[in-house]
Image: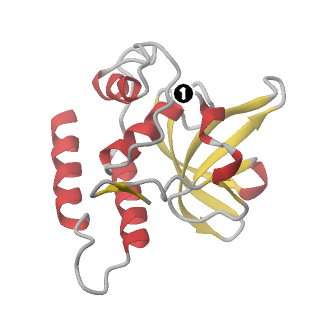
Amino acid sequence: MATARILLCMFFLAFVGRSGLPGSNTVKNDTETLIAIAQSQIGVREVNGNNDGPEVEAYLAVADLKKGEPWCAAFLSWIFKQAGYQQPRTGWSPALFPEARWVKAPSRGLVFGIYFPALKRIAHCGMVERLKGSWLVCIEGNTNINGSREGDGVYRKLRHVKTIYRYANWMNNKKKKGVLR
């Protein structure tokens, strides 16, 4: 199953990732690529419910984390790496929201963060797949059906925009031909 997902993701990247075509829109292609990679992971589950399993451990490895660590931010870092981005590479959700990356309004492909008052910080994150009125359809790792930050897999979630604390845009840091854009 993991091999099939990886092959599907590679095929999609080879097909959609061609942004050098006349009239192509690189930002749109980057957004669609990121979302397609995230979508390809929906249904991944931890093997023993302890932040483990082949896919989860691959996400953790991108952020230099060990098996058993929380992985919502590492999941996003893995998505960006698969799409050819140099950054982000973190397992710490607050690190995904430096002020220089803040965006006020949600849109496809943005990273979002949820603030937990008890922890006094952003403590869960995911990717905006699409907008649906005042709601966001999101793809998140280390969550569950209830939307917990201590979940068991990758899920598509529906979240109200008022529950989101911050949005960040990481799509302007892809390295192409030695140039950071």
Protein image colouring:
secondary structure
Tell me residue 55's x, y (percent). 31, 29
Q: Could you tell me how many numbered marks the image carries?
A: 1
Q: Residue furthest bottom?
A: 23
Tell me residue 77's x, y (percent). 44, 38
Tell me residue 24's x, y (percent). 32, 80
Q: Quadrant of the N terminus?
A: top left
Answer with left or right where residue 156 lies relative to residue 47.
Answer: right
Picture residue at 36% right of the left edge, 35% below the top: 44
User: What amino acid is labelled 1 in the image?
Assistant: Gly
Answer with left or right where residue 161 lies relative to residue 179.
Answer: right
Q: Quadrant of residue 42?
A: top left
- Residue 143 visible in image: no
Q: Is the residue 62 above or below the residue 128 in the image?
A: above
Q: Which residue is mark 1?
A: 151
Q: Quadrant of residue 51?
A: top left
